[in-house]
Amino acid sequence: MLEELYKEWNAKINVISRKDIDSIYLHHVLHSLSIAAIAEFKKGHQIVDIGCGGGFPGVPLAIFFPEVEFYLVDSIAKKLKVVDAVCEAAGIKNIRTKHTRAEDITNRKFDFAVSRAVAPLKELLKWSMPLIKKPATPVTDGSIRNGLICLKGGDLNQEIFESGARPKMMPIVKIFPEEYFEEKYILHVAK
């Protein structure tokens, strides 16, 4: 169903590269869902998707975690129009969208920020960390601490060095052994 919706909307408003649209499930949906392999979002959690574009990773994660609230933000309004239309047609009720920049959000706190190929890690941390609330109790159940979870690709050594952070990094190919996921990673930086 998502493939048909995105193909229809992509013909009107280009939010996914035309060469990529036929691989939407592998390149976009499955890539987004790799976050679910490291994060067990709990009922009532609130997640902000920074620079959501056409809805990735937020839309697949919202489907996977129906009792979690997702807040998708992007600075380009037409992309959010696609997200809103896809959510309405697919009956996704746990997504809210906002036409804004992450750094302009001042009145909200979230359990996690997620992002996919938006900006260098240094920038993502600057935008996301003020938005993330500290957990009320220490994490003792093996789940990951509140923070930023982002999807990145390629050689990240310089980008990580410049960020000053020490993220936990997992190769996605260990989750989904597909050639497409070689040199693609999930990074988690705790608050």
Image (cartoon, rainbow, N blue to C red):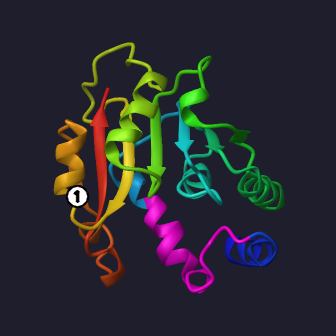
Horizontal side of 43 relative to 154 (left or right) equals: right
Horizontal side of 88 relative to 134 (left or right) equals: right
Residue 44 makes an appearance in the image: no
The C terminus lies in which quarter of the figure? top left
Residue 3 horizontal/vertical position (percent): 68, 76
Residue at 23% x, 68% y is 174
Residue 63 makes an appearance in the image: yes
The N terminus lies in which quarter of the figure? bottom right
Q: Amino acid at mark 1?
A: Leu
The local crowd at label 1, few if under 14, some if 14 to 19, many if 20 or more residues have their Cα within 10 Å, is some
Q: Quadrant of residue 156?
A: bottom left
Horizontal side of 70 relative to 32 (left or right) equals: right
Q: Quadrant of residue 189?
A: top left
Q: Secondary structure at mark 1?
A: loop
Q: Is residue 151 above or below residue 188?
A: below
Residue at 33% x, 81% y is 178
Residue at which label 1 appears: 156
Residue 16 horizontal/vertical position (percent): 62, 72
Which is nearer the eye, 76 or 116? 76
Residue 79 horizontal/vertical position (percent): 71, 57
Residue 124 horizontal/vertical position (percent): 40, 40
Main SS of the magenta part reads helix
Which is nearer the eye, 164 or 98? 164
Question: How many numbered marks have been drawn onto this rendered protein structure?
Answer: 1
Q: Quadrant of residue 188?
A: top left
In the image, the segment drawn in magenta is: 14-33
Q: Is residue 89 above or below residue 12?
A: above
Q: Is residue 143 above or below residue 114?
A: above
Residue at 63% x, 42% y is 73
User: Magenta span has 142?
Assistant: no
Which is nearer the eye, 94 or 109? 109
**Please, which residue is most extreme toward the top here?**
136
